[in-house]
Amino acid sequence: MPKVLIADELSERAIDIFRNRGIEVDFKPGLKPEAQMAIIGDYDGLAIRSATKVTAAMLQAATSLKVVGRAGIGVDNVDIPAATARGIVVMNTPHGNTITTAEHAIALLFATARQIPAADRSTQDGKWEKSRFMGVELTGKTLGLFGCGNIGSIVAERALGLRMRVLAFDPFLSDDRARDLGVEKADFDTVLARADFITLHTPMTDQTRGMINTAALAKCKPGVRIVNCARGGLVVEEDLAAALESGHVAGAAFDVFVVEPAKTNPLFGKPNFIATPHLGASTEEAQENVALQVAEQMSDYLLTGAVSNALNMPSITAEDAPKLRPYMDLAARLGSFAGQLTETGLRKVTLTYRGQVAALNTRPLTAIALEGLLKPMVDSVNLVNAPLVARERGIEVIEISSEDIEQYQATITVGVETDRRSRSASGAIFGGEPRLVQMHDARMEAELKGSMLFVRNADKPGFIGRLGAALGDAGVNIANFHLGRAAGDGSAVALVQLDGECPPTMVETLRALPDVLTVRALKFD
């Protein structure tokens, strides 16, 4: 039975989800890091919010951990590269708080347009400064969106409902999606120049860090108002503080800051600046939603292998998981077969999916094929980090899909190109079981299972007898024997499945036989 540790405060309904699905769960929020590390090795899953820091040291101690689930969108508290290296899937819940965060951005638009917090304080202090708090309408104004993904698109819809015009800068926003939303795509400088209000909805990357700085602010209209409910650091706080002081920026409202908790900040006390303490996701509905969502996602992964909202692995839906399972096995065995036959530097891998398998989500198949391929060459490669390992080693990975059906209903081909040669292995599913159906230029049908010998030889009479005799003399029993004849070069291929392990000296004994070209001992889990 899988076992999950809930290390931060999570809804009781989330705990019930784990238990109702047959997962053992311990609810232990508030433990010190040392106490967490002392017990984490007992768990298959770790559910967190933002309080628990999932460091490389903790992951090193998490010897059984398979998945970390973050109830929320931000994963700054998880060492994702360390988790990836150890084959631990990291999930978040990016959609559970989208509406809540978008509504908070809209609330801050109203607040800065009408100076509501300052007007409230003034009125409750017994003043009646009606003329001091002259505001502006949102209707008819232009909203500039930086980022039009899950949250930005909701803000756009709400703004259009308020009769605003919406410009969007987002390199990933397609023309069709922009038309569907009713927004106008524009480049970075155009949004700055035309917007009366700006809201930020981009992730924090090297490209977006400090994107709103002195130079960007100088391109804005005088009197622009800026809202940031996305990430602290997208705006250079000192530069915005100066623009608020000068009056070039008429107002700003931030829910996020470079340093949090933000006890002090260059923006605090500046004219018409509004601050909230990272409340974007702080509604009862959002907190409940992300807790339930992470419990469902983690349960799906631990029980069925379905992967949702993973940050370091391709997603596999609960519907796709059973369909993919036989092909995952086939891809893993083909990758392992090709990897064990690869002797020199690997330059390129081509994964070809034909027939029915091409209609499925093939990214997990590529990942598991790469894992099998790289295992003979790389320590600690796994399903999660295999694509990254390939990329770091400069191995080009190409995926080709075609739903055209040829000889088989579905085939997977793993092609490898090394410094010396190219080789490929194709497989199909027979009766629910994976089979090798072609080895480069030689057709055959073979299981890739247990201990095996791969032998390539000159296709001459008497060779099979000599091979069988050599195995018999060594006391090695043949479980299955598969033959294929190569096209055009006068060679043949034998795949011999053995009962038990291959004796250490067997390979050298077979290499000494006449007409042998290649011998390799293979092992399949």
Image (tube, rainbow, N blue to C red):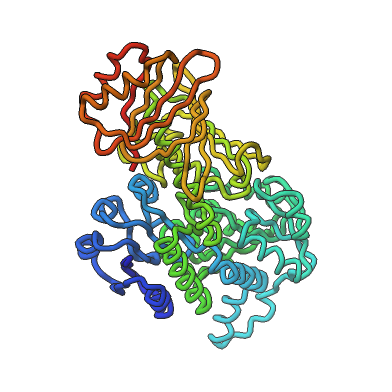
- In the image, 213 versus 76, the foreground residue is 76
Residue 359 against residue 506 in the figure, above or below: below
- Snapshot quadrant of residue 298: bottom left
Q: State whether residue 60 appears in this view.
A: yes
Q: How many marks?
A: 0
**Location of the C terminus (image quadrant):** top left
Residue 401 against residue 242 in the figure, above or below: above
- In the image, 419 versus 295, the foreground residue is 419
Q: What residue is rendered at 24% in x and 31% in y?
A: 476
At which x and y percent is residue 343? Answer: 37, 22
At which x and y percent is residue 2? Answer: 33, 65
Q: Residue furthest top?
A: 514
**Location of the N terminus (image quadrant):** bottom left
Residue 71 against residue 414 in the figure, above or below: below
Left or right: 349, with 260 as reference point = right
Q: What residue is rendered at 77% in x and 61% in y?
A: 165
At which x and y percent is residue 117? Answer: 57, 76
Q: State whether residue 396 appears in this view.
A: no
Q: What residue is rendered at 26% in x and 54% in y?
A: 63
Left or right: 515, with 182 as reference point = left
- Snapshot quadrant of residue 370: top left
- In the image, 105 versus 170, the foreground residue is 170
Q: What residue is rendered at 38% in x and 32% in y?
A: 481
- In the image, 235 versus 464, the foreground residue is 464
Left or right: 328, with 133 as reference point = left
Residue 119 against residue 373 in the figure, above or below: below
At which x and y percent is residue 497? Answer: 34, 35
